[in-house]
Image (tube, grey):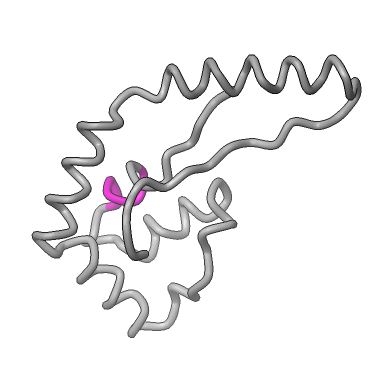
Amino acid sequence: MNINRYDLDLFRVDTGRLQQGLESLKPAYRFFWMLTWVIRRNLNEMKAYLENARNTGFHAAVADRYRNAGALENGLTEAFRHFLYYYPGSKIPGLRIHFGRGL
């Protein structure tokens, strides 16, 4: 099981190319896509969010604290292995998470 970290990927987006960066995240993180980024106001709000010192500090602390999701990945892999034993042929979903507050 592989965990995709929306919080880490979001803060890696180059705010100078924000719309393109957000669009590149869209295929992997459709669940988080509630806003239309082509609307200038929404892009401005996201840019302000990503550049806000409090948010970047919080993100850095979360990224440091939850740097390695290996134990979580291992536990989920084991849990889904048991699930597949009892429900063979079932499809296991991908897992996308966001550690954070707000957006």
Residue at the image point whose x is 53% and y is 42% from the top: 96
Figure check: 93 above or below 86: below
Q: Was residue 57 drawn as part of the magenta stretch in this picture?
A: no
Q: Which residues are magenta?
A: 9-13
**Whole-percent x and y of residue 71?**
44, 17
| Residue beneath the point at 58% across and 56% down | 30
Image position, residue 70 (x, y; %): 43, 18
Query: On the image, which quarter does residue 8 sit in?
Result: top left
**Count of numbered circles in the view:** 0
| Residue at point 76%, 16% (across, down) | 82
Q: Main secondary structure of the magenta part?
A: helix
Where on the picture, by quarter, is residue 5? top left
In the rendered structure, the answer to whether residue 50 lies left or right of residue 101 reads: left
At which x and y percent is residue 94? Answer: 63, 36
Q: Which quarter of the rendering shows the N terminus?
A: top right
Q: Is residue 11 magenta?
A: yes
Residue 60 relative to residue 41: left or right: left
Left or right: residue 77 compared with residue 91: left
Image x and y of residue 77, in percent? 62, 18
| Camera-nearest residue between 34 and 17 | 34
Q: Is residue 25 left or right of residue 103?
A: right
| Residue closest to the far left | 53
Q: Which quadrant would the C terminus be assigned to in this image?
A: bottom left
Q: Going 25% across and 53% down the picture, which residue do you hit?
A: 14
